[in-house]
Every structure is written in structure tokens, then in C-alpha cells.
Image: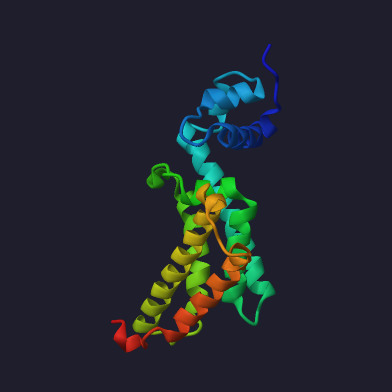
Amino acid sequence: MAKSINELDLKEACIQAARDVIAEQGVEGWSMRDVARKLAISHQAPYRHFASRDHLLAEIMKRCFEDFANHLDQSSQANLDDPLAGMGEAYMQYAALHPLEYRLMFGTPWPEPASHPDLVKHAVHAFDMLRQNLIKKHEKTAAGRKQAELKALFIWSTLHGLATIEHSNVLAHLTLSKGVQTQSRNFTQQMIQAALNSLPPQNAMR
């Protein structure tokens, strides 16, 4: 007989079960039936809260982005002398500690965004924090804003590249000099800062 789950707890139980199933099977092949089977409940029970698999996935991804943004925000506030450096360190730390969540956010095709506005809102919030920190360093002109956005994309793509490499299987097979892997994060942060300091003035980026 199917297990009975309190209706108030069913939504959260489905979210956690879906995360477990994705961790076990990958994000491509899981289904609502897998979630129900994991919880030993009726196959129809998850549909009380989620209209489809995509709606459940969108809720999981939204929460990942929300946690990610909170993590970046707390770290930038803890490092008021250099909030950008704090965010960079926090970015790499989150990616290392939460590989499943990181993969869901940045390595998984999104469900149809028009149907999941909350997902979009939480996803862009992390970028907006980075952009606003950069805008503070420039005049609030159109040219200054454009430069801040270009820098934000540069920082994000650089950190994402390193985080993706760290998650890859090939890294364990590279023959690297002693200390290279452990120093790579600090080195990348230093190179980002050096690149930002050497970027051309605003009027050359129009």
C-alpha cells in the first residue's frame, strides 16, 4: 500500500525526492513516476503541487539560484574592503561544495522560462549583484554601465570556466606541476583583477 504523506509536507518531499533522483540518475532521464516511486506514493500525488516534470525542475532550479545568490551576497558583505574578491571566492566555493546544484543552474537546459518567471528572477539576481558592485566603481553613465556589464560577463565566464574544469573528469588525469591545482583559484582571481585594471577606458569601449 502506498505510503501516506501529509499534504503540507508533500511539496517539499517531492522536491527533495526529485533532487535525490537527479543525483542518482542524472537530469536527462528522470520522471515524475521516479519521484513518486522514491516516496512510495501514488504516481498522481506529485501532480497535486506540480503540473509537470518541468514545473518541478523549475522549482528546484529556482531554489538553487536563490541559495547561490544568498551565498554570494553574504560573502560580498563579509568582505567590504573588496566585495568583488569576496564574490569570486564564494562563487568557486559554492561550485565546489554543491556540484549538483551548480550543474543544474549552469549545465541544464531551462524549462520554458515564460512559464516559470520566478526561476528567471532568481537566476538574474546573482548577475545583478555582480553588475551593481561593478557599477559602483564607475560613473553612473550609459558608458560606465556598459563597461560594468562587460566586466561582469568577463568575470562570470572566467570563473565558470574554472569551475567547470574542476568538475570535469579530465582534471584528475592532467600532469600538472606541484601546487598548480591548489593555486589555480587564487591565480585566476589575481588575473581577473589584473585584467580589470588594464582594461581600456570607457570611451574606448563604446
Classify the position of the N terminus by image quarter.
top right
Regarding residue 100, the answer to whether it shows in the image is yes
Which residue extends farthest left? 206
Q: Quadrant of the C terminus?
A: bottom left
Residue lying at the far top of the rendered structure: 1
| Closer to the camera in the image, 25 or 140 | 25
| Colouring mode (rainbow / by chain / secondary structure / one colour) | rainbow
Name the residue at 51% across, 82% down.
136
For the image, the number of numbered tags is 0
Tell me residue 201's x, y (percent): 37, 88
Residue 179 image offset from top left, x and y in percent: 63, 66
Q: Is residue 186 above or below residue 101?
A: below
Q: Is residue 63 visible?
A: no
79 w.r.t. 96: above or below = below
Q: Quadrant of residue 38?
A: top right
Query: Does residue 128 appear to the left or right of 206 in the view shown?
Result: right
Residue 82 sits in quarter: bottom right
Q: Vertically, is 154 above or below 174?
A: below
Which percent across, then down, holds residue 90? 62, 65
Q: In the rendered image of this protein, does residue 140 appear above or below residue 184?
A: below
Residue 25 relative to residue 109: left or right = right
Write the residue at 59% across / 74% down. 85
